[in-house]
Image (cartoon, helix red, strand yellow):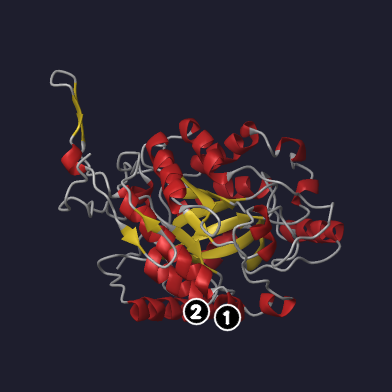
Amino acid sequence: MTAPPLHLAVALDAAGWHPAAWRAKDARPGALFTADYWADLVTEAERGVLDFVTFEDALGVQSAAFHRPDDRTDQVRGSLDAVLLAARMAPLTTHIGLVPTANVTHTEPFHVSTGIATLDHASTGRAGWRPQIASRAADATHFGRRTTPQLTAGDVHDPERIGRRLSPLFDEAADAVEVARRLWDSWEDDAEIRDVATGRFIDHDKVHHIDFTGPHFSVRGPATIPRPPQGQPPVMSLAHARVPYEFAARSVDVVWVTPHDRATAAAILDQVDTAAGRVGRDTRAWPLLRFAEVLVFLDTEPGAAARRKARLDALDGTQPASDAEVFAGTSGELADLLLDWREAGLDGFRLRPGTLPHDLRQITRHLVPELQRRGAFRTAYDATTLRGHLRLARPDSRSAHASPTGL
């Protein structure tokens, strides 16, 4: 039986995922906060017929420490709002999915759901969403409404321990996603009539309150925006341990995991499947796609990528740690790795370019053609929506048989 084509995405972040990437020879540090910089990256990714690009975001400036701010001045600090940035990229592209990160710990789900729905309309069906909790206690000081757990250095080195400490935030995140999905469904697909002759713009019987009440939110609804073109934009999350695996099983369509070899990939996927069983998810009715993360440094000449990474390590003063596997080699060697890991049951990969634009171009102009030669990746887009790229069905609106709001 022939394996289905791989799904392939790239994670865009600042000048690249290496802390010293902004000092690479072809980096563009002076352009990091310009639309043109991001447009060049996203259109390059679309040139490689990738499924989607993701945009990182946070509620505090970047830090070398996971759990607290730092005072370093030799690394990129500052970023653009991911949802707004993705919206700016929508009219510049035609096929590639756009998946911004948006926080759910200090942001109301009504506002986030509206932003993602707007992005889906602006991109004609290419939006996704990565809901993210605020894991740093310092982020709460920007809002002054609540506190969150202060993680320790000991927590940082134990993903299971982090998950347990942040479990209430993951529970809240699951409710936030549920609210967003209900709001996206609060308008039926044919709620808009737009009949000039009769003067009827909307059928009020097809717009519904969601009346969500939970321990974290009480949301009346309906949404202020018609149902997104995809019905529900795909929701995605990054997971390293039991609690975030359960969040993924409860709430998302695509989970990104961080194995370091084929054996650990298989073990992690078993944990994800077990989590789905614990929360009662039927993955046959509601598929959960599993992507592995790989931080990549690519060059055509053998050994060149490792030497380039070593120069960046020296500039940063250390060899940076990564939750994901760090690969330095040629596109052919990376293709071997991806196809080997796929045998563990992975559906695809989200690649983190070590430096931008260099490693992104290596992905689109060398890795993608190599995978295409092996019959493992598409040669052209065969769908126009992100759900289409991911081969996920468009869900029916859950409000289609609900009582009307009486607008």
Circles 1 and 2 in contact, beta carbons < 8 Å:
yes
* Callout 2: SS: helix
Q: Is residue 82 visible?
A: yes
Q: Which residue bears the numbered disc 2?
A: 242
Q: Amino acid at mark 2?
A: Arg
Q: Which residue bears the numbered disc 1?
A: 160
* Callout 1: SS: helix
Quarter of the image with the C terminus in it: top left
Q: CA distance from mark 1 to mark 2?
A: 7 Å
State the residue at coordinates (72%, 69%): 321
Q: Residues within 10 Å of mark 2 (few under 14, many from 20)?
A: many
Say whether residue 377 is left or right of residue 365.
left
Q: Is residue 343 visible?
A: no
Establish if 81 lies above or below 139: above
Q: Position of residue 355 (x, y in %)?
A: 70, 50
Q: Position of residue 206 (x, y in %)?
A: 19, 42
Q: Amino acid at mark 1?
A: Glu
Q: Earlier in the sequence, mark 1 or mark 2?
A: 1
State the residue at coordinates (70%, 67%): 67
